Image: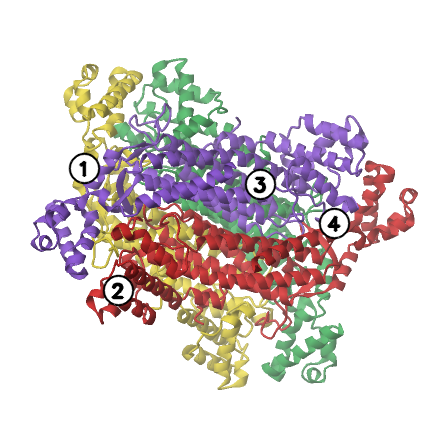
Chain colours: A yellow, B green, C purple, D red
Amino acid sequence: MPMRLIESLATTAPLAETFSDQSILRAMLDFEGALARAEAQLNVIPSGAAELIDRAAKSARIDATDWAAEILAAGTPAVPFVRALREQVLAENPDAAGYVHWGATSQDLCDTALVLLLRKAWDILEADLRRLEQALITLSQRHESTVMLGRTLMQAAPPVTFGLKAAGWLGAISRSHERLEASFREAFILQFGGASGTIASLGNHGIAVAEALAHELRLDLPDAPWHTHRDRLAAVICDCGVLVGSLGKMACDIILLAQSEVGEVAEPAAPGRGGSSTMPHKNNPVGCVATLAAANRVPGLVSNFLAAMVQENERAAGGWHAEWSTIAAVIASAGLGLASMADVGQGLSVNSARMRANIESTAGAIFAEKATILLSKRMGVTAARKLVEQALQQSREQGRHLRDVLIENKEAAAHADALVLRDLESPEDYLGSAGEFRRRLLHAAQQKISKKGE
Amino acid sequence: MPMRLIESLATTAPLAETFSDQSILRAMLDFEGALARAEAQLNVIPSGAAELIDRAAKSARIDATDWAAEILAAGTPAVPFVRALREQVLAENPDAAGYVHWGATSQDLCDTALVLLLRKAWDILEADLRRLEQALITLSQRHESTVMLGRTLMQAAPPVTFGLKAAGWLGAISRSHERLEASFREAFILQFGGASGTIASLGNHGIAVAEALAHELRLDLPDAPWHTHRDRLAAVICDCGVLVGSLGKMACDIILLAQSEVGEVAEPAAPGRGGSSTMPHKNNPVGCVATLAAANRVPGLVSNFLAAMVQENERAAGGWHAEWSTIAAVIASAGLGLASMADVGQGLSVNSARMRANIESTAGAIFAEKATILLSKRMGVTAARKLVEQALQQSREQGRHLRDVLIENKEAAAHADALVLRDLESPEDYLGSAGEFRRRLLHAAQQKISKKGE
Amino acid sequence: MPMRLIESLATTAPLAETFSDQSILRAMLDFEGALARAEAQLNVIPSGAAELIDRAAKSARIDATDWAAEILAAGTPAVPFVRALREQVLAENPDAAGYVHWGATSQDLCDTALVLLLRKAWDILEADLRRLEQALITLSQRHESTVMLGRTLMQAAPPVTFGLKAAGWLGAISRSHERLEASFREAFILQFGGASGTIASLGNHGIAVAEALAHELRLDLPDAPWHTHRDRLAAVICDCGVLVGSLGKMACDIILLAQSEVGEVAEPAAPGRGGSSTMPHKNNPVGCVATLAAANRVPGLVSNFLAAMVQENERAAGGWHAEWSTIAAVIASAGLGLASMADVGQGLSVNSARMRANIESTAGAIFAEKATILLSKRMGVTAARKLVEQALQQSREQGRHLRDVLIENKEAAAHADALVLRDLESPEDYLGSAGEFRRRLLHAAQQKISKKGE
Amino acid sequence: MPMRLIESLATTAPLAETFSDQSILRAMLDFEGALARAEAQLNVIPSGAAELIDRAAKSARIDATDWAAEILAAGTPAVPFVRALREQVLAENPDAAGYVHWGATSQDLCDTALVLLLRKAWDILEADLRRLEQALITLSQRHESTVMLGRTLMQAAPPVTFGLKAAGWLGAISRSHERLEASFREAFILQFGGASGTIASLGNHGIAVAEALAHELRLDLPDAPWHTHRDRLAAVICDCGVLVGSLGKMACDIILLAQSEVGEVAEPAAPGRGGSSTMPHKNNPVGCVATLAAANRVPGLVSNFLAAMVQENERAAGGWHAEWSTIAAVIASAGLGLASMADVGQGLSVNSARMRANIESTAGAIFAEKATILLSKRMGVTAARKLVEQALQQSREQGRHLRDVLIENKEAAAHADALVLRDLESPEDYLGSAGEFRRRLLHAAQQKISKKGE
């Protein structure tokens, strides 16, 4: 697969293929072939010419290697492409060659080809979305009761379950899945407007040809050409941006939990995976790293796309021309993040003993809130807060558990019996609605998934 | 209205009010009042305390003027706010004061307040969306048959109608309207999770309190707290970004058409509007300027929001803290663009004579494509292309109309009769499917609007 | 200090003041007063009028509270401002009022006022730069020999010193200091060009007035007006962006080291600092949080500024209008990050015992590279790598130190004597050039600082 | 030249080559060869091994085609690269192969290779900077006296000269040239720090090897490794961002002046340049289009780079990994903008007759300011303003020149003689300091250029 080194940390093989020259040329040829067939159906061009063009489009071997200068001079890849296709037809029939690209403008060709590539990309993205969602459902179910520290502002907080955490990731991913499905589907539309977006060159046949062409390419027909109205593409790009944000959040959580000092999870190990060129002991969290890199790369690209939406009149001078590489990079990054997180989710090893040990090592500090509430009911809020703060201080200074300090404290003992205090630091007893939240998140995600399966 | 000079070109008065201290404090008070009521309903706190808190929340006069240092030290505005509200309750009943903010975490308060402000903002945005859509429907209908130059890559191109152009703007705006409605509604949800997002402090009552609280505030209850899952907010911000892109496109078109040398449209004139401090003759297109400024300001803000979605574990260290000013600035810019374009759309003056004159001044060059097609049918594509290119060259050099050059050309005359050539430069005869596209765009937009009215 | 809640986590009090209405109006008044004096010096306006204007500018009480609508209608705050100043002069002398703002265009006033504010902001930023640099020098010297884990890709790596880490932060900050000093100084220039940037309204006196005006305001005179050439401002904004990136890196390191599970450093504790509204035990790293929030907020703003550099002809339609709030937000964020990191740097508590304990807890894994090198010299590279990898495996499985495993290993013992292996895990013996790098970084920074002091 | 279609509108051939696999592999091989030589000089590795490695590095044929999966699994291209190079050495001498990459970490290799590519890219950029500057000097001198409309907020304003406009572009470009030269030179530094940035693996020889290695590669030696301190690269990227902003401004001006309705300039015409696939009459401004596309693409990329500066501890998890494709895209876009504007600047055709005609077509409105000043001196400011506004109104309504209206106006005639009024609309008489500003801008730019030539 011809992935270039410069983007080797920025895409996956299937998405590199999707935006390869071969794939782009295939999409462009599909457009021209379908256009000729559609126009012949409506007697806009001779059916003989259409057959020759269609055959050339199916079999053409077009080599774009030397187009660089020509593309920049023309301001569009369509010019050398149409020239090259015409040359292939010309060999057989000069007049037929004149009917290549009949009535279409460069942007019709480039935009429709782009849409065809997006459809190809969506199949890849969606497969990994499903794979990731399934992995998270499994993780969340398996760890329904695995307690671990909550962590807020990078500090220990009252406990949660790993099942809830996985369900939280799932919720965000499945909401993005739903948004992406809608925006991609809205973007699977034909572009066909001719020079000024009126298809004037086809006289009264414009819309009929557009309908036939959309049918040939299995695309929807929009209300009107959208040469300078890029909102549908922008919605796709934005939804990819939101997805990547949620993938980055998941990667961030995992990489934090995988730190040597935390040790609660580890990325799947495999030969050649996560190794270091110098340090034999390393198991680098490469899936998270790739995803966090994607999360660094996408926001500015989204911003570029939005800024370039301000496109002049009937066809833009620079706005459209800025899009291709941006779109390819956003989709590639989203796909890389998805594939990486799907791999990580499927193979994640979870160390529940270490999770419990890390709770234990806080010496009860994270249960101070619980103690306060417990005592508030008996001795009033203000007094309870004061008592617990003093006990916390004592616990820290003496390196003893908060529980033990409280049990020995006469005032506390007067208001809560020892048994209750002894249970203070049981994480299972301070999970609140974690179980129900987990259940609801899973339920909502599974409903979305099964709805799609219908 | 206390709009600050530094943002005087970046917001509107109603949106400045929405994000004013007074409005934020009101939303925070509403949260605390509703929380107390909800907790009292479920006997989580004493009903006497709840009544005092509720009353204080309704009548409180809280002054945030001096909070700057305290907020930075605490890392959240919630700390001085809760302190201030407690102080107000304390005056009446010390123990009740302890039940202010019971079981909630800072981010519950801040996020829910933010959602309440978004609901307020959406009402403002939606009114201007409707106003703009109505203005565009009117413009598009009035100028159904007003022909004007198409313009591609900033150069003259075959004609379109102003009705089609207005309909194109409408299509993009109404699609954004639909996206925004969905994403805003999805974001109108309660935040209530306590320290680690499990509402552990309320034991078994967590979800019941959350339900009651959501009901009190007329918000939806999400599957689970979303302290570090910001995808719903991100979708709102992105959809604002797409809207602003489409508004910028409309403003860009208008400001180009309003150039002194083009003169096809002009922004509404009014005393004090568009004047210059030095040049008495100026009628500056200030609505477009404000909108283009918004379009410059929003993309990077969207990017910031997306980048900040990577939030750590149960509550973020910096990601959440970066959001408030970003969200307010995005909404303000979107609102400014909308209000400006609604004003412009309602009062735009359209100079159809100048539009026709500008077509005429191209001396037929924009009909070269039409001539080529016309002649192609008779003399073959290749020969027709060559003939028209020569005629164009002659037309330019001699400063004569392409039509006249062609009529005199023997080869052309041999293939097309003079009557047909004489009509070559009638813009009405080269509009292709402009009319049908306009009709479809309007129809789709009107269907969306009437659906919302149901 | 009137800092608004919505930006309470996004600025500091002195920078909020710098961009307050009062401060902006003062800068605008300073411009108009100086302009009148300069024009009177060159007999461009009557000296009597100049005196009245100057006096009004010094004493004026201008209230911008109600300008919102007027500013948007005019597209610039200059219009109501000049009107208000004229009204004040008018009371004394109608004809003098006509000479207010004589020959200047709105953007001359707004841009020069902005430059005056930037000068004020730079003094604030620079004081905190010095404070932070001094704090880092002290930390780096104090901890010259404090060993700690290196950490790469969030995993334990061979040791470094905390002194080197602090010196690394210092190096980046002091390089940014130097860049910022250069770009700010380059931006302290007058804007004065009149309607089209030629000062045509002043005939032959344009440049002489510009020189006198620059002198009055203690600004440099640029080669020419720069209404649509914003590169100098862009350089300031970019350099702020780079600074904030380096501040974010420092905050990121500290917040990672301050995690409960790592515990190597802690932000300064103070009453009201880092507390939580729910969790009595929290010492939140609020300085890092504020800085990381700034680092989230600045990149997109830089992007907005750069995108808005594409400004049309003599004065822009939207590009200029997008700048004010962006610049203020960037400077505010940079200042917040600087002040926060200076506070943190000055009060950081460093737990060197915990640093050593964290090294110890890796059970020698981080010294595997060292063992490989040691053995390579005796038994060849390939054999050494294999032996150490096996020993590492054994160390992990048995939970024993790598050192002990190697000492018992016959092959290793054959190639290295026990004494050398016994020292394997001494961090002090595996610091390489850490000391010299630290020294060089400090030296370079101190040279830059003393150069500035000259 | 293997430029891919997806980036065919986003780079130039020489810059595509610079970031091609072949070029990257060459830079990586240069690093490893130089490292082996440097280490042999200091007896860190056997000189026999060094010779074999150096020879392999010079002659190696390395094929990266199939590395995609391996790179993602390792998280760095260094792993398969070092493996491939070792395999080549291994064929000759197994033990020598072990000394490939001795003591270096992956990022040392990748960063230094990147710096070598940046040096190559700078040579390309600088040649086009000089070409563009020279073209602008020529344009500015040739059109010293060519008058044209000023344009502010897209509306006609008092006149300027095209020479001043070209000098304004030159000033901005030459200031960027100076910034870029400084930031690129600051970035031409070695990266060599080993696992944790202390070169511990080389014991006491670390710095000596680093010095020798820097010398071999003709790079500067920084104070210390900069694995997670990316400020120098960030400064390069930002300065490219500022340059592209100024190029975009120039392109924007030209494309506006080249509009069919304005017609004051045209991009150079050449066969295949600016043509359309449908419209035979088009001469599209493709150089401006390419530059504006670059200006759309760069700001978000700068933003991404800045956001990714927040890199953890000794080596980053995602920040570094996000850089390569971003840097390549920024440099490519900057180079495309530069080459395009240099081409445009060298071949721009300027229509001074049309410039004068466009001034004339404003019917004197742009001289209203001049008339006001003229009359103010005689009749007071307030009365003059009122009179001119009325005359302007009359001029518009009657379609007559302002000059003629004023000459007939009795009040005006009473205060200014007819001769003066007759000259009112001479653009040459209302250029203010345009000439001197032009001279100063050229002088400053030429001084910078000659300083570089020294």
**Residue B148 visible to an observer of this rendering:** no
**4 or 2: mark nearer the eye:** 2
- Say which of marks 3 and 4 sits in front: 4
Q: Secondary structure at mark 4?
A: loop
Q: Amino acid at mark 4?
A: Ser
Of the residues tagged 1 and 3, which is closer to the observer? 3
Look at label 1 and name its amino acid.
Arg
**Marks 4 & 2 on one chain:** yes
Q: Position of residue A447 (x, y in %)?
A: 30, 48
Q: Nearer the viewer, residue D164 or A360?
A: D164
Regarding mark 3 in the picture, which secondary structure is present there?
A: helix
Q: Callout 2 environment at 10 Å: few (<14), some (14 to 19), or many (20+)?
A: some
Q: Nearer the viewer, mark 2 or mark 1?
A: 2
The residue at which mark 3 appears reads as C324
Tag 3, which chain?
A: C
Tell me, yes or no, whether dots 3 and 4 are on the same chain: no
Is C337 situated above or below A270?
above
Check whether the beta carbons of the residues at disc 4 and disc 2 lie within 8 A of each other. no
Local crowd at mark 4 within 10 Å, few (<14), some, or many (≥20)? many
Which residue bears the numbered disc 1?
A356
Which residue corresponds to mark 4?
D433
Real-space Cα separation, disc 1 to disc 3, in angstroms? 52 Å
- Which image quarter: residue C268? top left
* Residue closer to the observer: A387 or B192: A387
Structural distance between the alpha carbons of marks 1 and 4: 77 Å
**What residue would you read off at disc 2?**
D47
Q: Are marks 1 and 3 in contact (CB under 8 Å)?
A: no
The chain to which mark 2 is attached is D
